[in-house]
Amino acid sequence: MPRAKGGVKTRRRHKRVLKAAEGYVGAHSTLYRTAQERVDRAQAYAYRDRRVHKREMRALWQTRIGAAAHPCALSYSRFMHGLKRAGIALDRKVLAELAIRDPQDFAALAAVAKQG
């Protein structure tokens, strides 16, 4: 029985890895073995960072909301608690956008949160 080398599948796999490694510096974009290592590492970081991104964005929104609430004599936690008691259900992303783009409306929300 002849030896099966799998040339077509191997070439296809190599081309797929080298295509994913386009733009990498030096041998990492041209040599299969080093490109494979870099692509695997890049995919691992991408998987991890899709989750980390969500955490970082939420922290950023909280910081922006807190910074906008302080001139209204409210802390972040008191502001959020006041909104919850007032029955205003806006998520942090929307509140952070309001804080940046429309400070007057945010101040009105802060006044409602103070009463709540």
Image (cartoon, helix red, strand yellow):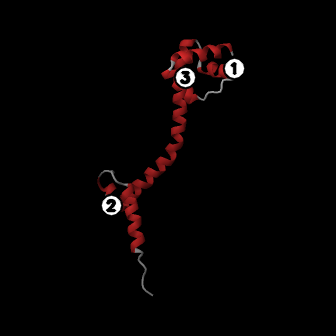
Q: Amino acid at mark 1?
A: Ala
What SS does tag 1 mark? helix
The mark found on residue 65 in the picture is 3
Residue 89 shown left or right of residue 52 in the figure: right
In the image, residue 30 lies at what x, y percent? 31, 59
Q: Is residue 69 visible?
A: no
In the image, residue 85 lies at what x, y percent? 70, 21
Determine which residue is flagged by label 2.
31
What SS does tag 2 mark? loop
In the image, residue 14 lies at what x, y percent? 38, 64
The Cα atoms of the two marked residues, 3 and 2, are separated by 48 Å
User: Dot 2: within a 10 Å radius of its alpha carbon, few (fewer than 14), some, or many (20 or more) residues?
Assistant: some
The mark lying in front, picked from 3 and 1, is: 1
**Residue at horizontal 53%, vertical 25%?**
96
The Cα atoms of the two marked residues, 1 and 2, are separated by 61 Å
The Cα atoms of the two marked residues, 3 and 1, are separated by 17 Å
User: Furthest-left residue in view?
Assistant: 26
User: Dot 1: within a 10 Å radius of its alpha carbon, few (fewer than 14), some, or many (20 or more) residues?
Assistant: some
49 or 97: nearer the viewer: 97
Q: Could you say which quadrant of the image residue 16 lies in?
A: bottom left
**Residue at horizontal 42%, vertical 85%?**
2
Residues at discs 3 and 1 in contact (Cβ within 8 Å): no
Question: In the rendered image, which quarter contains the N terminus?
Answer: bottom left
Label 1 vs 2, first from the N-terminus: 2
114 or 45: nearer the viewer: 114
In the image, residue 115 lies at what x, y percent? 67, 13
The mark found on residue 86 in the picture is 1
What SS does tag 3 mark? helix
26 or 111: nearer the viewer: 111
Q: Amino acid at mark 3?
A: Ile
Q: Amino acid at mark 2?
A: Leu
Label 3 vs 1, first from the N-terminus: 3
